[in-house]
Image: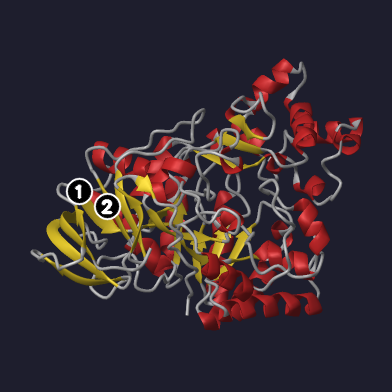
Amino acid sequence: MEKKTILVKNGIVIDGTGKPGHRADIRIRNGMIERISEELQPAEGEMLLPADRLCVCPGFIDAHCHTDFYAEHLPDACGKALQGVTTDVCGLCGDSAAPIGTGNLEELRRRREYRLPGTPPLPARSFGEYRQQIDRQGNATNMALFVGNSNLRIHAVGYENRHATAAEMSRMTGMLTESMQEGAFGLSTGLTYVPSMNSSTEELVALCRAMAPYGGIYNSHMRNESDCVMEAIREVITIAERSGCKGHISHLKVSGKRNHGKAGECLALIHEANARGVDVSYDVYPYTAGSCGLRTLLPPEILVRETVFTPTFLLAPDTLAMLRRRYEEADWDNLLLSCGGDGIVLSAGVSGLEGRSIGEIAAQWETDAAEAVARLLCRTEGQGTIIYHALAEKDLRTFLLDPLCSIGTDAFARSYTGPSAEGCPHPRNYGAFPRWVRRYLLDEGLLSIEEGVRRITSLPARQFDLKNRGLLQEGFCADLTIFDPKTIGERGDFLHPAQQPEGIKYVLVNGRLTVEDGVFLTEKNGRMLRMH
């Protein structure tokens, strides 16, 4: 589709600043917002988008997701665009699509989670090479990509649980700074996942110091989100403070019933850091359930093994005895202890068992949770996924109310059919932003619609230094989401997630229509954004 002049007519403009909405027209030319005025007359040949009684907003920015995992092979995935998302902040939780070095590459290929079936092996490539690939083929959304700490560690150190040597640190620093020069937004960690968890605080401070001159942001899936969540927040603050980088906490939560009620304490730490000049922010997803790989249920000392998902190892009596003991201990991010077997549901991996809890599966197999987890991991070869119900609604609302909170999906690029929709993926993949607007803003009034839109537009744009995005202003990039406030809402649920949400009428990415009258156009109008 060629670029053309577009006139958005008679909409209720909610500009992303938090100010009250007002009726206005918007003219878009060459991918930019050219004019915003109370009355603009259509020009000859101009495309007219009627927006009577519709909310016209900056395109929604997903503050935390994993679009880069599938983007190369699913550039026209519709699940995000039909939520109103125009920009995805991704490469998070320590894993990114690039850079991928030659060191330990074969082991990375064997171990990598969330592989789409039928895709070729991961190639070694620089950050710049991946960016050029995405820009050539396009994508349904823009992507602001971080560098995964695991990528650096795998290339330089491998999967061993040890400190990096001076030479290995030099190799990681070189890969990171090269990526920053090629447009990366910073460094992400997944400190509950192997091998990112093997990184010490000192190592992360050193990496962040190396990227600080480029404005790099430290974006952390913290070392613990349950019993030791306060210590984990302090580590993020320490790394940001000592390195001079901005800090950002991914999908902030307090998991497990015995930790419910700690949200206020978490926020007190973050605000105290900001008060003394340490820039630390966070995002959440608007659900009390999270999702991750089934393998996350294993303790870290098992996950370091490459041959972990074989029956001869996992189902050995000694291994099962160790698992049963470790599932009673709280010195690691133990989801089975935090949530219980009935609070963890298999979402993908074994047909016929998807949508059933670990407790239900264990009862069907007449065994306990430890053996059920081991058997499932063997059957899925470590590629299964789970949904875990670990959060309290009261804590979630406490986080949502805080002005530092942006909204993310923690989702992948998915469509409604095909391999990306198999099983019962978390409904946030398809409906998180309509849920945020409908439930928390329009129905419950947790925040005003204007402030709620700010949380998904200009706030994440500021947190991640996304230039000329997140606001409806003349001279800004024309990423727009236009929705019907009467009908917008999530339609999927945990058993039937792959449902198109309601109320998203138009989505424009870089001035081009991606969604027209609620229909995804399969246009790949997105591109890789650059920090510089």
Q: Residues within 10 Å of mark 1 (few under 14, many from 20)?
A: many
Task: Please give the residue where the numbered disc 2 appears in the rendered image.
Answer: 482
Q: Nearer the viewer, residue 518 or 175?
A: 518
Question: Looking at the rendered structure, which numbered label has been put on residue 54?
Answer: 1
Task: Residue lying at the far front in this picture: please name it.
Answer: 45
Q: Nearer the viewer, residue 54 or 324?
A: 54
Residue 107 quadrant: bottom right
Q: Quadrant of the N terminus?
A: bottom left
Residue at 63 percent of width and 54 percent of height = 223
Residue 375 appears left or right of 396: right
Residue 212 appears left or right of 336: left
Residue 431 vertical position relative to residue 171 in the rendered view, above or below: above
Residue at 74 percent of width and 60 percent of height = 198
Task: Residue lying at the far bottom in this picture: please name it.
Answer: 213
Residue at 76 percent of width and 18 percent of height = 365
Task: Please state which amino acid type lies under the numbered disc 1.
Answer: Leu
Question: Looking at the rendered structure, which numbered label has been put on residue 176?
Answer: none
Residue at 44 percent of width and 67 percent of height = 464
